[in-house]
Image (tube, grey):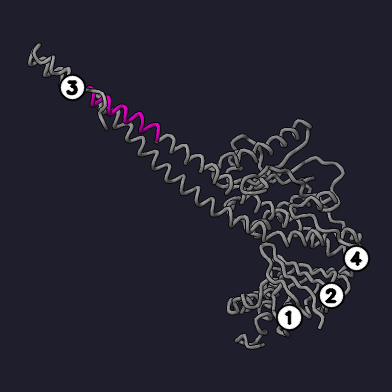
Amino acid sequence: MAGGQERILRGRIRSVQATKKITRAMELIAASRIVKAQQRVAAAVPYSEQITEVVKDLAAAGGASQSPLLAGRGEVRTTAYVVIGADRGLCGGYNAGVQRAAEGEVKSDVLDGKDYALVTVGRKAEGYFRFRGYTIAKVFGGFSDTPTYAHARDIGQDVIARYTAGEFDRVELVYTRFISAGSQEVVLRPLVPLDRETVTGGDGKPTPTDGAAADYEFEPDPGTILDTLLPRYVEARIYAALLNAAASEHAFRQRAMKSATDNAEELIKSLSRVMNRARQDSITTEIMEIVSGSEALSGGKAVRQVKLVDLGPIEN
Amino acid sequence: MATMQVEVVSPERVLFSGEAKQVITRTLGGGEIAFLPGHAPFLGALTECHTRITLADETVMDVAVHGGFVQVSGNKVSLLSDIAELGDEIDRDRAQRAHEAAEELLRKEHDAEAVSALSRAHARLMATGGLTGTSQAAH
């Protein structure tokens, strides 16, 4: 029946319209959250800059610490990857990017005959690696869009405890760095051990030349300060990574939802075009039926009159 | 009178930044220490304490600092702390209750958790007008 197709199309258009409303709302929410997330990234910079400066000053003063966090281990057997992803999907290639980067590292470690350990942050990352049969050392989740320092502390304490216990010999962070609302990149950053390179390669801006590494007084001695400082420093690094990841997640989601909304609009347009044609067709067919019906009833005489009926431009 | 730049920074935000005449805090194992403008470069680890910052106009700002670090260099004092609370923002009643609960716990058994809870509550109470006072009328 002719009207059937039209009805189906009408239903599809309605459902696409409903989807479009949802994606539009998600887009707007993500857009407003980017700004907030960006502010939080900025608010965390002073602390991470200062703590980096303190670590540098202490290192310059020769704060001899026996902390394994600083010394590192001679032979690296197991590398741990802290993979920071999202809790929810619908954010384009955000999770895929981080997961791919981490998986690549893990695979190359395995090829080199080394061990790996995975610490996942965000439920999506957990699901991805669990499904593929990787062993996961520890799972965190439920706070990917608004991480707090307490979350960073939980992760930091866990990672440090495992590192000190010898479970890992090296820890790397895999997350998406937020550069601007338009660009983010997946980065792999060494977290532990904290060698000179690691300390200077933080996400905080490089500190201005710290003068003539001033002769500091220490209380208590530099070694003890360093021992209490290093875990804080690791936490600050994780916190910065979490905030960057959250901002990136919102940016990715906004972009994904924007293109979903655009696609929905496009789909609605082409579907209504098809639907209009179908309706036109069914009207034409109906008229044809009427005409041929009346022609059949009135015999040959009606034919001439019927020819006058213009079937061309039927509006709507 | 000479002043110096003082900053109180927590990981989530900068709590205070401004000019001050004096900062009193407490270092790990070293007792209370005061910094005046022009102090020699100093690095210290802090313990839970009631930190007092005397501002340029002689008003005293109270901060409860729960661990962290202090860095003094070039006439600038930076207090870095995981958890630091300005006196005005502390819920005194809650701190009082926490103080009592921690004391109660300590009377029964001596564990590190309770000791740190007590010193936290203590620092909070000190920053909101002393241990026994019921109001914030201390200053």
Q: Which residue is labeled 1 in the image?
A: B55
Q: Does the CB distance between marks 2 and 4 fall below 8 Å?
A: no
| Chain letter belonging to callout 4 | A
**Do circles 2 and 4 both sit on a common chain?**
no
Look at the image and give the residue range highlighted in magenta: A269-289
Q: Nearer the viewer, mark 2 or mark 3?
A: 3
Q: Which residue is labeled 4 in the image?
A: A214
The CA distance from mark 3 to mark 4 is: 100 Å
Q: As shown in the figure, which amino acid type bears the numbered disc 3?
A: Val
- Is there any visible trace of residue B108 in the rendered image? no
Q: 10 Å neighbourhood of mark 3: few (<14), some, or many (≥20)?
A: few
Q: Which residue is labeled 2 in the image?
A: B30
Instruction: Say whether residue A97 is magenta.
Output: no
Q: 10 Å neighbourhood of mark 4: few (<14), some, or many (≥20)?
A: some
Where residue A46 sits: x, y (%)? 73, 62
Determine which of the numbered discs, if any, sits on residue B17 in the image.
none
| Chain letter belonging to callout 3 | A
Q: Earlier in the sequence, mark 2 or mark 1?
A: 2
Q: As shown in the figure, which amino acid type bears the numbered disc 2?
A: Gly
